[in-house]
Image (cartoon, rainbow, N blue to C red):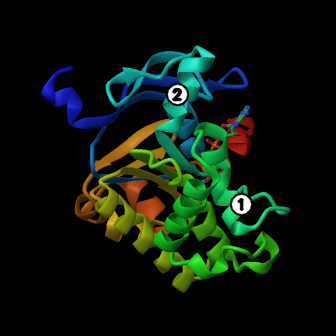
């Protein structure tokens, strides 16, 4: 591996992604530097979750290559499972198991992927809950947690195995501005304190940009912007402008099915 490869955590090279026989994204080139926080922005249905699916190996590219830490995302099941241990995922929705306590939810990946003794797992769980400010909520069930707290428990579970790469899919959905601020601060803090690389998929532009080093906007089947948050705010591109201002009319087709019919 060369030095320049070492500096890149995730690389997309001329990637095309199809779903249900339809091309969702094409010509995707992206290099995410180690240690950085990258926002992947774009309207609903533009393919943000699809992009993440290629990163975690759930979706095999129709063309091109996806690399994580210098290694092509494998297709063989065992190699894929190994790679996934190095990617912490906070899914759209929390995915907490409702009949387990917060602590038991955080312990799940440790039980599944390590052979650590019970006391060590308990201690690690305590540390992870502490990292998201919820040590006192260890014995609560998901129904006893607020939305913001549940999201933090899910975050503690995502970092349970100390993955070097964190991927967040819409981490702010359903949260009020204060809870959103708490989550975004945590994402940023964890990234810096633990030396992670983070990719945040969201349409919450204004909450997300302040903690990002890099922003990518996807729309109309590809990347329409890639640069710093400052460059994004200053962009004169009408597509980017429409997205940032949340306008229904403009170069982004917000209802692609209807547009196809009308054409
Ligand atoms: N399993 C699937 N089979 C077929 N088509 C799919 C599948 N999953 C997603 N799609 C299609 O792919 C496109 C992109 O979906 P995706 O979920 O990646 O969008 P998104 O940007 O994450 O949207 P949102 O912001 O609403 O989460 C959509 O048109 C969707 O209908
Ligand atoms: Mg999505």
Which of the two discs, 1 and 2, labels the residue nearer the N terminus?
2
Other-residue count near label 1 (Cα within 10 Å), few / some / many at <14 / 14–19 / ≥20: many
Question: Pointer 1 and pointer 2: residues touching (CB < 8 Å)?
Answer: no
Q: Which image quadrant is residue 121 in? A: bottom right
Query: Is residue 228 shown left or right of residue 225?
Result: left
Quadrant of the image occupied by residue 6: top left
Work out how far the residue at label 1 is from the one at label 2, CA to CA, in angstroms.
23 Å
Q: Is residue 14 visible?
A: yes
Which quadrant of the rendered structure holds the C terminus?
top right
185 with respect to 52 (left or right): left
Label disc, if present, on residue 82 of the rendered structure: 2
Which of the 4 image quadrants contains residue 37?
A: bottom left
- Which type of secondary structure does the marked residue at label 2 adopt? helix
Where residue 189 sits in the image (x, y, percent)? 35, 68
In this rendering, the answer to whether 36 lies above or below 233 is above
Q: Which mark is residue 104?
A: 1
């Amino acid at each position: 591996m060369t030095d320049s490869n070492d500096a890149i955590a995730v690389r997309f090279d001329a990637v095309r992604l199809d779903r249900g026989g339809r091309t969702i994204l094409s010509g995707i080139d992206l290099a995410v530097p180690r240690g950085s926080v990258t926002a992947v922005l774009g309207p609903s249905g533009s393919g943000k979750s699809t992009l993440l699916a290629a990163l975690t190996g759930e979706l095999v590219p129709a063309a091109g290559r996806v690399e994580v830490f210098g290694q092509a995302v494998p297709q063989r099941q065992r190699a894929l499972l190994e790679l996934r241990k190095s990617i912490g995922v906070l899914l759209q929705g929390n995915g907490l198991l409702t009949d387990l306590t917060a602590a038991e939810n955080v312990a799940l990946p440790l039980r599944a992927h390590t052979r650590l003794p019970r006391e060590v797992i308990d201690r690690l769980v305590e540390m992870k809950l502490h990292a998201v400010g919820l040590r006192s909520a260890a014995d609560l069930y998901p129904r006893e947690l607020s939305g913001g707290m549940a999201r933090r428990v899910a975050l503690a579970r995502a970092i349970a195995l100390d993955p070097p790469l964190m991927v967040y899919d819409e981490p702010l959905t359903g949260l009020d501005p204060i809870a959103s601020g708490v989550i975004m601060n945590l994402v940023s803090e964890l990234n810096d304190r633990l030396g992670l690389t983070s990719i945040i998929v969201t349409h919450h532009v204004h909450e997300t940009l302040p903690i990002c080093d890099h922003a990518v906007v996807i729309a109309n089947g590809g990347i329409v912007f890639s640069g710093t948050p400052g460059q994004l705010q200053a962009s004169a591109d009408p597509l980017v402008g429409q997205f940032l201002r949340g306008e229904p009319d403009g170069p982004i087709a917000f209802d692609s099915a209807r547009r196809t019919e009308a054409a």
